[in-house]
Amino acid sequence: MFFKNRLIKDTVLLTFMQLFLDTSALLLNVFITRQLGAEAIGILSLTGSFLGLAGILSNGNAFLCTSRLVSEEMGKNNSNPNGILAHGIKLCLMLSVTVSAVLFVFAEPLSSKFFSGASMEEAIKFMPLALVSGAISACFKGYFNACRKASVSATGDIIEFIIKSLVIIVMTLTATNPDEHSVCRIMIAGIIAGNIFSLVYCLIVFAKGHQKYAGRCSMNFGKYMTYAFPIMGGSILTATLSSTNDALIPMCLRQNGDSVNEALSRFGIFEAIVIPTLFFPSVVLCSMSGIIVSESARASASGNNERIKSLTERLTRYTLIFAIFASAVLMKFGDNIGELLGGGELAGKMITIIAPVVPFIYMEIILEALIKGMGLQGFSSLNYLAEYAIRISVVLIFVPKFGFYGIVASYYSSNVIGNCARFIKIIRHTKTPFRPFRIIAVPVLYAFLTMGAVELLTRITGAGGNSLPEIVIFVILWGIAYFGVFAGLNFKSFELPDRKILCNIHK
């Protein structure tokens, strides 16, 4: 009965799809690092950051914008969600063409400023092909997500990733002595191919199965823009600050005494090995985030405060239970994971040190989804501004003095302060009770008690070790013990939603 609920089925499906994407992306990073070196993955990370910023400027996070506004349109009587999609595509075309023109005209100065003076003019001029196709594709994916066809959006993402990866792998294997220019060209070619194939797939699915509505769209294009720009503003602000932070890290590492190659290599290991490893367990949360935006937007539009409160309470509880376990695993096996993924001692040390902040990072995924769904865009933008101001300030002050440990300090300070602010805002807005002992202290206690029990078991059986199979077995046994304690003691955190709540979510 429980899995008949559409929300749960979509989450399970998206989790498996996202798991495939995250695993493949991490393996792709490992492949590029070993094939071209850590410096190359650093260049790719900078290119991806620049292209990500350009992508947000050219579509304003069309997935989120379209998903939320289409969801709200579907919650109204006699409406026309297809009209919202048309407005979204029109706006994205206007933005992407404008940004593409700017990139083409100012390719040379952008190349010299963002890519340390390297000759990247030709590579930047190819970016518009990725921007236009990516913007329109994002609109369709947001539309499918709002229509509760999340599997279509996820399939589009998988097609995009597979094509992109194949292009990158083939071009990487055929590359000889790749420089910054050729590495960026590989990255951009893969993204262009992936975006185009994904867009074609979305167009085919929409043409075959879209629903026709007799009603009239509740807003014209001008009104759509007034609703969309606050959503877009937060996304653009976040992308701009994130790209600025990424560009500053190699520069500050050089001030600490690293050469250009060393700075790019360290930055590449951090972006391609450390960060994906820390985020990898959050696959289920990432799968849920898009659905949560739609569900909370519908509840907010209909004034169903009880539903929002119930979603908030259960999601924050489940997220912390899961995130605390993931953090404990990364703290214990961070060194081994870093070595296994080819990041060496540096990656392992960084994973272990940053692991305690993982619960804050994972909470951001869920809290931001709730915040955006409830229309609290102003708070989201201000909070991101404060968070990145802290992160960038710490990078500028501490990285030149302490090197990589300065990056750790920036992650701790920004994530702890920013996500505590999000949590306080959410519980006050939804009037959700906060029980720190129940949702924080108990999972922490159970994580370390069950870890000790499994360690004792492995010592008795002589099965302890640092090989990959032994680590996997340990984590599986640990997970069974940890989550089994909650289920076995009938802890209220693991109660399934009652029938009434499930029916409300389904509606």
Image: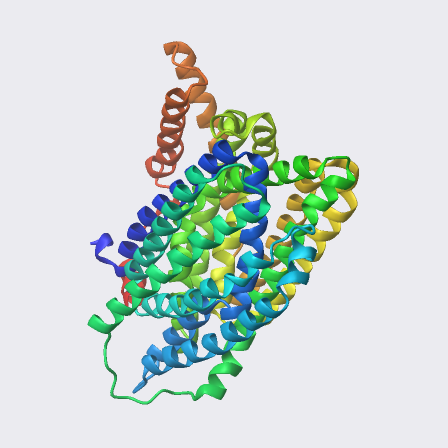
Question: 243 or 16, which is in the foreground?
Answer: 243
351 horizontally vs 461: left or right? right
Residue pictured at 29% horizontal, 61% vertical: 152
Q: How many labels, in total?
A: 0
Please identify the quadrant where the N terminus is shown: bottom left
Question: Would residue 299 be seen by someone viewing this image from the given angle?
Answer: no
What kind of colouring is applied to the model shown? rainbow
The image position of residue 371, as x and y in percent, is 51, 65
Residue 259: x and y in percent read: 72, 36
Q: Looking at this view, name the residue that lies furthest to the front.
A: 176
Left or right side of 288 for 337: right
Which quadrant would the C terminus be assigned to in this image?
A: bottom left
Q: Quadrant location of residue 243?
A: bottom right
Residue that appears at 61% across and 66% down? 381
Q: Is residue 464 above or below residue 57?
A: above
- In the drawing, does residue 350 fall left or right of residue 398? left
Q: Residue 289 placed where, x, y %? A: 42, 57
Q: Residue at x 46, y 18 (%)?
A: 466
Question: 135 and 124: which one is in front?
Answer: 124
Say whether residue 465 is visible: yes
Is 414 above or below relative to 322?
below
Residue 347 is situated, as x and y percent measured from the top left of the image, at 57, 31
Residue ID at (68%, 62%): 109
